[in-house]
Image (cartoon, rainbow, N blue to C red):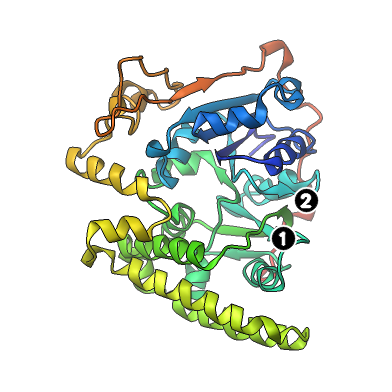
């Protein structure tokens, strides 16, 4: 790639101050970002944060699309965001991940520019306020050394070879289109499923440790149970990837090393909390993996995305997405691939509860005479190319 364009795509739900910091840091990046595309779930929450906010008026490259909670799923919402981008590289982020410095994007896309990989994901650093367990978990999953992963590494690394996170990950758009993009209807793990397909096709995935974002969560037991239930569902739905690379072994390793870490830091008092958290995670995962044998009402109760299951039933029954029911885009938009959604008409309602669709775009197009000047954009030095610890 020669001086590629870069867009950032951010699915958002109830964004907070982290979202404000995220946008501010993106606008300060050393490698210029063309568009920031926000796929926001439930307009009211975004409006309550951004109403008359100076940030909303400071930049003219922010595109916001509002959808309802029923229209969201991890795969298709991100696909729709990519449809709105014409950049050579797009970066997926979440609304609570903040770049640690102004060089994050430049470092993240380096493996793509130097053609070492087709996906590059960033290191996640826990917030200072996070508890000791969460801090260690982030360091375990996102170490300080970069790694380049391909088909030859699956035998040794197992499920870690496919690991990738859309909390912050850059994608080669040409290869993304070639591979068919993210799964259209998936409850979780859209990033790992794509990474696995890319590796199986012969491409490589880069973990770029010097591109860092601040991101962590201190989930309670119920939230951990539900998230891991969804994790189990996603792995059950894709046996072609996960059947031969179980995540249970990696989970056991994390627990044993966390216990050792807590003892070393003289924080053994947190070990019971770790064991209880791990129990909820494992129970959620096992139930999610066998969700097809559970009653539908229980599946919805166990999932962190109950609306996903309503949409899944409609999607599977119709064998296509019905835009006018709030579950997708029209065929003409699908063919075009880049066309912006149009607002639903006032008479368009959801089939099951009569709610009107909130699918609407607030478009802030950068005028042609104000497009980013790329003449001075940084270019990687081919003599000092990105390297992983495996090279």
Is 84 drawn above or below residue 164 in the view shown? above
Q: Mark 2: few, some, or many residues within 10 Å (few <14, many ≥20)? A: some
Instruction: Check residue 148 in the rendering and tell me which mark sits there, or answer none.
Output: none
Secondary element under disc 2, as helix, strand or loop, is loop
Is 156 drawn above or below residue 384 in the view shown? below
Instruction: Check residue 100 in the rendering and tell me which mark sits there, or answer none.
Output: 2
Q: What is the x, y in percent for residue 83?
A: 46, 31
> Which quarter of the rendering shows the C terminus?
bottom right
Q: What is the x, y in percent for residue 63?
A: 59, 25
Does residue 280 appear anywhere in the picture? yes
Residue depicted at x 50% and y 39%: 174
Q: What is the x, y in percent for residue 16?
A: 66, 41
Q: Nearer the viewer, residue 174 or 327?
A: 327
Q: What is the x, y in percent for residue 342?
A: 42, 18
Q: Residue reaching furthest left? A: 317
> Which quarter of the rendering shows the N terminus?
top right
Residue depicted at x 79% and y 47%: 381
Residue depicted at x 69% and y 73%: 136
Secondary element under disc 1, as helix, strand or loop, is strand
Q: Mark 1: few, some, or many residues within 10 Å (few <14, many ≥20)? A: many
**Would you identify the image quadrant in which residue 246 lies?**
bottom left
Q: Is disc 2 in contact with disc 1, using a CB cutoff of under 8 Å?
A: yes
What is the tally of numbered marks visible in this picture? 2
Would residue 91 appear left or right of 203 to someone viewing this image? right
Does residue 84 appear anywhere in the picture? no
Is 378 drawn above or below residue 294 in the view shown? above
Residue tagged by mark 1?
Answer: 125
Label located before the other in sequence (2 or 1): 2
Residue depicted at x 45% and y 31%: 67
């Amino acid at each position: 790639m020669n001086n590629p364009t870069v867009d950032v795509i951010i699915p958002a739900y109830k964004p907070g101050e982290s979202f404000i910091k995220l946008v501010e840091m993106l606008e300060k990046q050393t490698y210029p970002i063309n568009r920031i595309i926000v796929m926001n779930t439930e307009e009211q929450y975004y409006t309550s944060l951004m109403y008359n906010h100076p940030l909303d008026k400071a930049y003219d490259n922010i595109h916001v699309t509002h959808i309802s909670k029923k229209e969201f799923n991890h795969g298709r919402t991100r696909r729709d965001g990519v449809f709105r981008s014409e950049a050579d590289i797009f970066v997926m982020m979440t609304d609570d991940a903040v770049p640690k410095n102004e060089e994050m994007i430049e470092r993240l896309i380096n493996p793509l520019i130097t053609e070492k990989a087709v996906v590059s994901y960033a290191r996640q650093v826990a917030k200072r306020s996070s508890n000791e367990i969460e801090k260690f978990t982030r360091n375990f999953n996102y170490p300080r050394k970069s790694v380049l992963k391909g088909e030859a590494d699956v035998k040794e690394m197992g499920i870690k070879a496919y690991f990738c996170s859309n909390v912050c990950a850059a994608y080669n758009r040409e290869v993304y289109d070639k591979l068919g993009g993210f799964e259209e209807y998936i409850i979780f793990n859209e990033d790992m499923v794509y990474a696995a397909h890319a590796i199986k096709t012969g491409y490589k995935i880069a973990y770029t440790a010097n591109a860092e974002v601040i991101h962590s969560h201190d989930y309670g037991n119920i939230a951990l149970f539900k998230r891991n239930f969804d994790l189990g569902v996603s792995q059950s739905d894709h046996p072609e990837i996960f059947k031969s690379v179980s995540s249970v072994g990696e989970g056991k390793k994390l627990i044993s090393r966390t216990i050792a870490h807590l003892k070393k830091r003289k924080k053994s008092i947190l070990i019971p909390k770790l064991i209880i958290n791990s129990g909820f995670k494992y129970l959620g995962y096992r139930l999610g993996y066998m969700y097809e044998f559970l009653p539908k009402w229980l599946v919805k109760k166990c999932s962190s995305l109950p609306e996903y299951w309503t949409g899944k039933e409609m999607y599977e029954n119709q064998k296509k997405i019905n835009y006018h029911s709030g579950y997708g885009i029209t065929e003409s938009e699908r063919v075009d691939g880049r066309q912006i959604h149009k607002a639903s008409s006032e008479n368009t309602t959801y089939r099951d509860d009569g709610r009107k669709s909130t699918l609407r775009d607030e478009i802030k197009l950068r005028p042609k005479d104000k497009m980013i000047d790329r003449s001075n954009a940084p270019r990687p030095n081919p003599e000092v190319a990105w390297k992983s610890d495996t090279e």
